[in-house]
Image: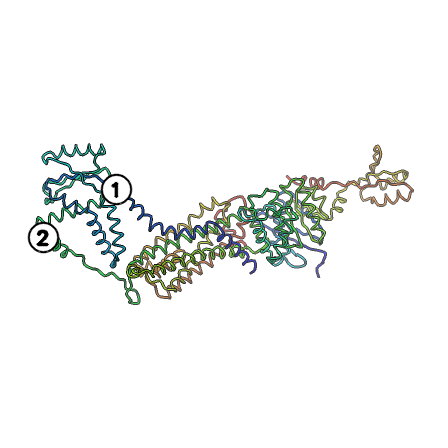
Amino acid sequence: MRKFLAVVKHEYKKVVLKWSFLIGTLMLPFLAACFAVVPAIIFSIKGEPTRIAVIDPTGKITPRLKQNLSVDKLAAKARKAAEDSLKNFDASHQEDMKQTAAQFGETFEFVDYPFEASNVEALRREMSSMITAGELDAYLIVPQDISAPDAAFEFRSRKAGDFVMRETFEDALNDAVRSQRLADANISEETLDQLSAKVNVDVKGVDMRGEEKDSDGVMAASFIIGLMIYITLAIYGQQIMGAVVEEKETRIAEILFSSARPFELMMGKLVGVGLAGLTQLAIWLATAVVLIGVMATQPGFVDLIGDSLPTITPLMIVYFLIYFLLGFFIYASIFALIGSMVTNVQEGGQFAFPPIMLLLIAFYFSFAVIRDPGSTLSFWVSIAPFFAPITMPIRILAETPPFWQIALSILINGLAIAGLIWLASRVYRIGMLMYGKRATVPEVWKWIRMK
Amino acid sequence: MSDPDVSLRVENVTKRFGEFTAVDDLSFEVRRGRVFGFLGPNGAGKTTTIRMIVGITAPDEGRIELFGRQMGPELQDHIGYLPEERGLYKKLKIVDQLKYFAALKNVPAVEAERRIDFWMDRMKLSEWKSKKTTDLSKGMQQKIQFISTVLHDPDLLILDEPFSGLDPVNVEFMIDVLSEFKTQDKTIIFSTHLMETAERLCNDILLINRSQKVVAGSLREVKQSFGKNLIALRATGGNGVLEDNEMIARVIEHADEKEIQLRDGADPQKLLHALVSSGATVTKFELIEPSLNDIFIEQVGGGAR
């Protein structure tokens, strides 16, 4: 037992005291923050104003278009869109919106261009050459009859790839044309808005116990949890393999085996690295709890997000940790087995493919579970060994199944672990002393049966 | 019940790998406080035998007894084993590796640190304590590996090719360290290809070839049994004794001494006694022994192929 603990301590320290652990632990929250913030920063960088000429034979579209592309109008539109998706909206957000809109809005600069309606073809050529010469960025040709069903607006731009600019422009144009058509048909815009207001659909899931449950956000949270388990299992599994291969490659195994039982050594390694993984998860969880806690004290946050966050109970966290450990021991024992078969890390990398594949399949099954946690497929994949460590936590989060299913899943995966560890330890005790060449499957089978 | 003078007893041990018999019905004893040379060509079964002694693998047949008890995991703490193929963790500090190896041999942490300091100092490597393996030369790594085998103060030390990769100065240094260790009434099993080193260090030897025992016994006995019954003699008088044809086969005269070949079974002690009692003044009387190298080549070289 003392030797086992010595191995656990050694392996734990080896992982936790490495730079990569510290970086990995800090990196995930940091990356998450980056994903949230960086796109906003990039898109808020001010573009060059687009100089645009409008050929409007009707003379009615241009004023409306100019108005729609004005800062105030854009801000109002953005606010409306935000209010539709989020029920509550406070003043500070409105300010943000306005700033963003101002940046977008300024990017259009109308160039007055005198024209004669008769020769469209000549106009087109003329303006194209202006664009080539850099005097103009874009032009729009409004058709004679905007009410015709096949009326086509020609928008030609040097920066057609700038989708932010294009979408803003298209929206503004659409609105302008629509208002004009309505005006022509003598319908006021207010009337139309009232008539075409969206039906308010209240989407809520009903769980097994018949309680209403908000399903907004559950999908995102399930996906994040699934991805997190997948990544940690893959990383820590390969960590185990690397450690096993190192001891084989450097022949340290021979010294270790003359000091302690191979089973103690292998289990010590699994437990030590597993605890390191648990440490990392605990740090992440604690960070998440603290962050959410801090944000929850901000007024408005609860109203804004609170509804859509899935309820995570302490019991769920306990389940997640249990399933992380189940998954860890399943995959770590497979990786340990592979590590003791191969002769170096590169070879190990090639043979890491099957367990990684299994993990990926489990991850893909998790989408089926997110879509319908109560289905027969979800039941089976959340019970099956190899898959349950990823699919069951997601199922628990999406719609906690009856306790007997969780218990059955834990039991079956526990048995799978016992079997895999038995297999891995049989291969480990022989494979670690076999130098020179990679073991073939029949050889490994022989090792397993050896007394 | 068991003989306290015997550290290790190997009884009729056999180990097979599939069709191949790596060790075939091997028996020998290693006496306490002796340096035991375990010799044999490559592939003779030395490493397999050693692995069974240190409890890495178990024999298929036969029995291994250490200090009168059947070998098992709990006896591993009494053995220090330096394998022929050996290494260290590449990216771990030397002191941390040594602490880990000591912990695996059940040495308490405080005691381990004391011993690590002692041995690092003895090996003149103190300033390398906090370095990583990759910063050390091969010779230094060898010494670190040696330290890892003695940290738990083992009663039985098994060294497989301990000097490979060391320069002559360091070989001498290590031999000094080993002889210090030997005086502590410890048993050393020493496996090597270097017959000159074996001849210098070993009290007893065992030579195996093709999975089987070929020669065993104390170095003296072995050499005598392989002696060609040659005696180098420098003496004045006693010429009559040398004419005894029952004892002496041939006398070859050299410039300042005689080389005497005894008949098979003749006792050199009797000859010496006869010479002395005949009144001769003996200034040199030396049994010329074959070197261990000669014996090895004769026993293994003839048998091989």
Query: Which residue was labeled with disc 2?
Result: A187
> Which amino acid type corresponds to the residue marked 1 in the rendered image?
Asp
Query: Dot 2: few (<14), some (14–19), or many (≥20) neighbours within 10 Å?
Result: few
- Quick one: SS at disc 2? loop
Q: Residues within 10 Å of mark 1 (few under 14, many from 20)?
A: few
Which circle marks residue A320 in the picture?
Answer: none
Q: Are marks 1 and 2 on the same chain?
A: yes
Please give the chain letter of the residue carrying mark 1: A
Residue A299: x and y in percent read 30, 61
Quadrant (top left/top right/bottom left/bottom right) for the C terminus of chain A: bottom right
Mark 1 to mark 2 CA distance (whole Å): 34 Å
Residue at the location (81% across, 44% down)? B265
User: Which secondary structure lies at badge 1?
Assistant: loop
Quarter of the rendering containing residue B109: bottom right
Residue placed most toward the observer, B31 or A4: A4
Which residue is at the far right? B279
Q: Position of residue A405 (x, y in %)?
A: 37, 64
Q: Position of residue B75 (x, y in %)?
A: 63, 57
Measured as percent of width and height from the top left, residue A447 is found at 52, 51
Left or right: B165, with A153 as reference point = right
Q: In the rendered image, which residue does mark 1 sit on? A: A162
